[in-house]
Structures are given as C-alpha cells and as structure tokens.
Amino acid sequence: MRQMNVEEPFVKLHDKLSAEGRDPDWAYAMEQTLGNFFLSRSSQLGIEVPTIVCRTSGCEVQMTTTQKPPLFNQLTKAAQEEPWYATFTPHQGPTSVFNGVEYFWLILKRK
C-alpha cells in the first residue's frame, strides 16, 4: 500500500486494523457476508476483489480493475443499500495505479 502512494491517514487506519486481533466468530461470518456481496456483483463491473479481511474492529476490502473508467463507486453505492452496511463507518481509500492495475481500498469500521 505504501509503494502505491496511498494517503498516510488511510495507511495508518490500515496498519491499525492489520495489527489487531481477530474476533473469530464475527470476522469469519462477516468475511462470508462481504464476500458473497462483492463477488456476486464485482465481475459484471470488471472488478476483482482479491482480499477481504476482518479483524475485531472492522474489515478491509481491496478491489482492483483494469477497466477504464473504474466502477468502484457503483459497487460501494450498492453496498450502502445492504443491511450490514449500517453497522459500519466506511473509510474509502484513494485509488492508486500500479503496473496498469487500479487499486481501491474500503475499510469498514464497526460502530
């Protein structure tokens, strides 16, 4: 993430989430829920979701695309209509391009 010039406040949020412990019951269930949502919608938008990781205080979703223009906003807008979305405070990272692939991060912090 640092190699892609992602803004420092977002990197700090990522680092904090990455360093914390895992709530195994909640994290596994939420990863499944998020995976079902993102994977069922992402392919039609030309987006891949290589990483969904949940810890104790929230989840991080990484998305990538080579499509121009990227359609990350369409996917996150659809997420806002899901019941689970209201249980989070979202933090959208800036997009970064690395080797022709555009990256987008979404951190969902538990309320």
Image: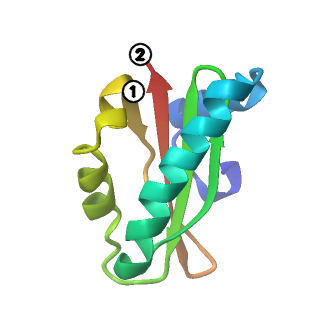
Q: Residue at x 49, y 66 (%)?
A: 39
Q: Quadrant of residue 23?
A: top right
Query: Which percent across, then down, holds residue 71?
Result: 31, 70
Q: Earlier in the sequence, mark 2 or mark 1?
A: 1
Give the labeled residue for mark 2.
Answer: 111
Q: In the displayed structure, does residue 13 sit left or right of residue 72?
A: right
Q: Residues within 10 Å of mark 1 (few under 14, many from 20)?
A: some
Disc 1 element:
strand
Q: Residue at x 35, y 77 (%)?
A: 45
| Pointer 2 with pointer 1, Cβ within 8 A | yes
Query: Which percent across, then down, holds residue 104?
Result: 48, 57
The mark found on residue 88 in the picture is: 1
Query: Which percent across, then down, holds residue 8?
Result: 56, 35
Q: Nearer the viewer, residue 22 or 93?
A: 22
The answer to whether residue 55 is seen in the rendering is yes
Q: Quadrant of residue 27?
A: top right
In this picture, is 20 found above or below 106?
above
Q: Tell which residue pokes out farthest to the top in this image.
A: 111
In which quadrant will I find the C terminus? top left
Callout 1 amino acid: Phe
Q: Residue at x 25, y 55 (%)?
A: 78
